[in-house]
Image (cartoon, rainbow, N blue to C red):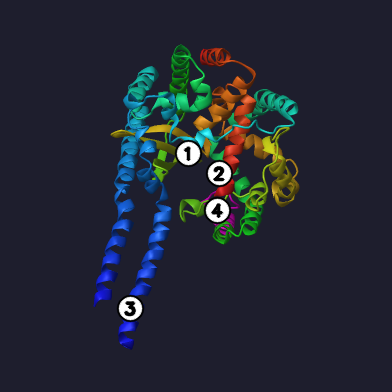
Amino acid sequence: MIRNRGQIGICSAALFILLACGIVSTARAGPSFALMNDPEAAGGQTSSGTLDSEFDEFEGFDEFESEPAPPVFDPLVGYNRTMTRVNDRLYFWVLKPAAQAYGAVLPEFARQCFSRFFKNLGFPVRLVNTLFQVKLKGAGVETLRFGVNSTVGIVGFFDPAKKWMHLSPYEEDCGQTLGYYGLNGGFHLVLPFFGPSNLRDALGRVPEFFLDPVSYYIPGAFAVRVVNRTSLHIGEYESFRKDAMDMYILFRNAYKQNRKKKIEE
Amino acid sequence: MRYFIYVWIGLAVFACLVAAPAMADDDVEDVSQLLKNKIDSVLTVLEAENMAEAEKKEKIMSMVEPLIDFELMARLTLGRAHWSSLSDEQQKRFIDLFVGRLKASYLDKTTFYSDQKVIYHPAVKRGGKIHVPMDVVTGEKTAEVLYKFYSAGEKWRIYDVEINGVSLIKSYRSQFNEILRNGTVKDLCDELKRSASE
């Protein structure tokens, strides 16, 4: 009798574990179940020939329908639009010509080395923010990368950690950390020179300034970093801007989407 | 003994439940393979040496056109409310203009970089859609690109692309909303036409 009960116990325990696994996997596979239970969502898109009303064409694409129905809260819209234009002019009149002249003097190989050097110096910002977000693996990777690249990589001119050890940097900044703790971005704010931002991320720049050896401890290095970086990315801003129907709205929306993704990662 | 039978039946039923979604993953595999083949052939055309730029563009467009549902993208960008407020003629005009713009922009972006390398990540199912994430590496730069597919009958087609988290549909949509908040559909079409001719 007791033995029998024991067997039942073992079997029900096994069943329970299976059930638990099943619930987890169905929860993960949720979308495909939802699709099976919702013939309309599946049928509405199957072929355009069967569409009766316009409504069906949007069925199943709620990811967009829920998006920006209420107007975006943007109290500084006038200032923001002006600053967007100012930054745009700054790029074409000052930064781009400077970067092109700089690029004409220094070969790309050297500029890439500088780029990696500056990137390596961004280590304190990334380390602090991985730690604050309890991304311990990220903190470990960052520390290892800094150690390897500062030594084997000759003060960061090369990136052997990525090339040989396949360790990519963890791009975490203070704005993302604040977002990680649930702080919303607040209203959009276009910073002079730095470009699109919001209240939270602009605040995040303050501790970053002190954590960043380039802006804080090495005078003049900041300008070199910006020009160096721009020289390696000429054409990208132009190409992005070219698609704009309303440049300010495009930048504002793209900034929001990009930050959301980065905070979720 | 009877308990064992119950338990075994229970297990069998469960195994089926767990296995069902796993079997549907064939689609996910197919879609990633389809996209991979397509991108490979686009890259081959891009790298071809004895071909004029215009010819390359034409060839690439004819290759990707069956895969990308430009018209659906146009409708999704305008959104249900705005779309249903348009007359048939306005809808047609809008689609013509916007699809033309999307195609031009796609070709522009595709041909901008020469040597691209693509690192594919496993595709995932999201609410009946299939998302195929990848890293597009050009030199030292990496862009995270996500192609989103929906099931169009027999085929799977692309309805949106995200680059570094920025959805093409959403970013156009926010601009359309702004233009339509202060203006009319005619303004929107004029703007599309104006910026296309620049």
Which residue has dot 1 on it? B139
Residue A153 image label: 4
In terms of depth relative to the viewer, which is nearer, A23 or A241? A23
Q: Is residue A151 magenta?
A: yes
> Can you say which quadrant of the picture contains the N terminus of chain B?
bottom left
CA separation, marks 1 and 4? 19 Å
Which residue has dot 2 on it? A261
Q: Which residues are magenta?
A: A145-159
In terms of secondary structure, where does tag 2 sit? helix
- The residue carrying pointer 2 sits among few (fewer than 14), some (14 to 19) or many (20 or more) residues within 10 Å by Cα, namely few
- The residue carrying pointer 3 sits among few (fewer than 14), some (14 to 19) or many (20 or more) residues within 10 Å by Cα, namely some
Labels 3 & 2 near each other (Cβ < 8 A) = no
CA separation, marks 4 and 3? 62 Å
Which residue has dot 3 on it? A8
Residues behind callouts 3 and 2 on a single chain = yes
- Which residue: 56% across, 51% down? A170
> Can you say which quadrant of the picture contains the C terminus of chain B?
top right
